[in-house]
Image: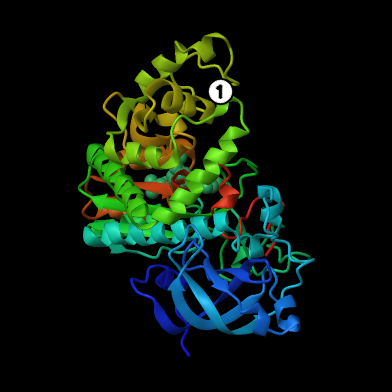
Amino acid sequence: MRHTKVKDLLNSTTTLQEINAKGWVRTFRNNQFIALNDGSTINNIQCVVDFENTPDETLKRITTGAAVSVTGNLVESKGAGQKYEIQVNKLEILGDSDAEKFPMQPKKHSLEFLRENAHLRVRTNAFGAIMRVRSVLSFAVHSYFQQKGFVYVNTPIVTGADAEGAGEMFQVTSLPLDNLPKTEEGNIDYKKDFFGKHTNLTVSGQLEGETFAMALGQIYTFGPTFRAENSNTSRHLAEFWMIEPEVAFNDLNDNMDLAEDFIKYVVKYAVDNCGDDLKFLEGRLIEEEKSKPQTERSEMPLLEKLGFVMNNDFKRVSYTEAVDILRDSTPNKKKKFQYIINEWGADLQSEHERYLVEKHFKCPVILFDYPANIKAFYMRLNEDGKTVRAMDILFPGIGEIVGGSQREERFDVLVEKMKALGIDEEELWWYLDTRRFGSAVHSGFGLGFERLVLFVTGMTNIRDVIPFPRTPQNAEF
Ligand code: 4AD
Ligand code: MG
């Protein structure tokens, strides 16, 4: 007999005879009521066991975490809070669960404890909800770009180019580390390595993506990226997923419009399609907030915050204006910032980004036209000769969620910039070819997918929005 998903049973419009459901026991009360969850929805279905006619041995095996199959009728529930329940005629234990040892007890666990049990945490309400929202968001990403006719490009994960400068890289090699082949000069002989050269895991698909945009017009990537930065923060992963659209003939303003429209679309898509999960996560957050001091509480409940982002324009502010605001801000004057902003040219830290978004503008902010020397080599130089057409989107509670720019399309200017930064022209010969043959204005950006999931779920640690986080000193599972 084919089983029906719990979600479909709960959404049924009539009572049903002889249905089968399969799932995992969340709780078993009074030797009679199973709360069954199969992952199709955050909601459990109540299964009423005919305990008088069920052998004691079987009843004992209905424990939290056990996999069971129940067959019976879907009837109107007499209990509060649910329309239907299953009156069980036949119960089968598919997989026992040792109630004493099962780590996911029906009680509140700390997020740290759950991280240590990342293979089982997905059986909790919160992580089930987060992972469903994550899945829906990734579908929304594809849906947005596909509807607009963008071509999805799979850029390489192993790369020979390490010039982007977006972060420290993980080396990929098949050389024996305890017996490295050497050249006559005594250096490591990468000609003997698998690819015949030094290779790394990619930090971004942008440079390859640009070559495709200069043929296909509008492209996007959506794949894993890797950064070996030793930054153990609640916003950084060593392995994270990035979405990188790149569009020929778009300038920086078009780029900002695209990024804003895209973010609003995917947030709305999640709100429209993850109602139950987001409501649960909102409730979870409200509970959590109660234990915090008043000053640290966030001002808006989760769904209101998402609605605010969907329905309001992002504030567009130049770096120069932002620095003026920061220089005159109370935390700067009172030396409350860890990094004091004294002069134009200073790199902005997350404390500054969050001040602008959370305290000053109180809405998402797009900062643009950054000083050239704190941004990547490929960004288009402005007429002033000192700023570049960069843009970062800053979100409340998150800080930077998007980084992007209009690209330097002028061959000579690009080469000069690379020379100044000591970037090997030969290594990037293929990238420079896009500026040799039919170069044109183009722009793109990268959205950190986990930072988006953080924002939409209201979680605060990036390790809690990816199935199995990879961070310094941690690659379990
Ligand atoms: O600002 P980033 O470094 O930009 C790039 O990589 C460009 N190549 C993008 C482009 O123009 N196509 O990274 C883009 C975004 C950041 O804004 C942030 O959301 C996310 O990627 N990100 C990280 N997310 C999690 N863990 C990390 N270590 C991250 N580093 C960046
Ligand atoms: Mg950035």
Residue name at image x 25 percent, y 41 percent: 257
Residue 166 appears in the rendering? no
* Residue 34 left/right relative to 433: right
Residue name at image x 71 percent, y 63 percent: 182
Nearer to the camera, 447 or 193: 447
* Residue 26 left/right relative to 140: right
Q: Is residue 91 above or below residue 221?
A: below
Residue 117, horizontal then vertical, whole percent: 69, 60
Three-letter code for the amino acid on which mark 1 is drawn? Thr
The quadrant holding residue 212 is: bottom left
Residue 4, horizontal then vertical, whole percent: 45, 79
Residue 256, horizontal then vertical, whole percent: 28, 39
Nearer to the camera, 272 or 148: 272
* Residue 288 left/right relative to 98: left
* Residue 373 left/right relative to 65: left
Residue found at the very far bottom of the displayed protein:
1
Q: Is residue 193 above or below residue 50?
A: above
The quadrant holding residue 309 is: top left
Instruction: Classify the position of the C terminus by image quarter.
Output: bottom right
Residue 334, horizontal then vertical, whole percent: 56, 9
Give the tally of numbered discs: 1
To which residue does mark 1 refer? 295
Secondary element type, mark 1:
helix
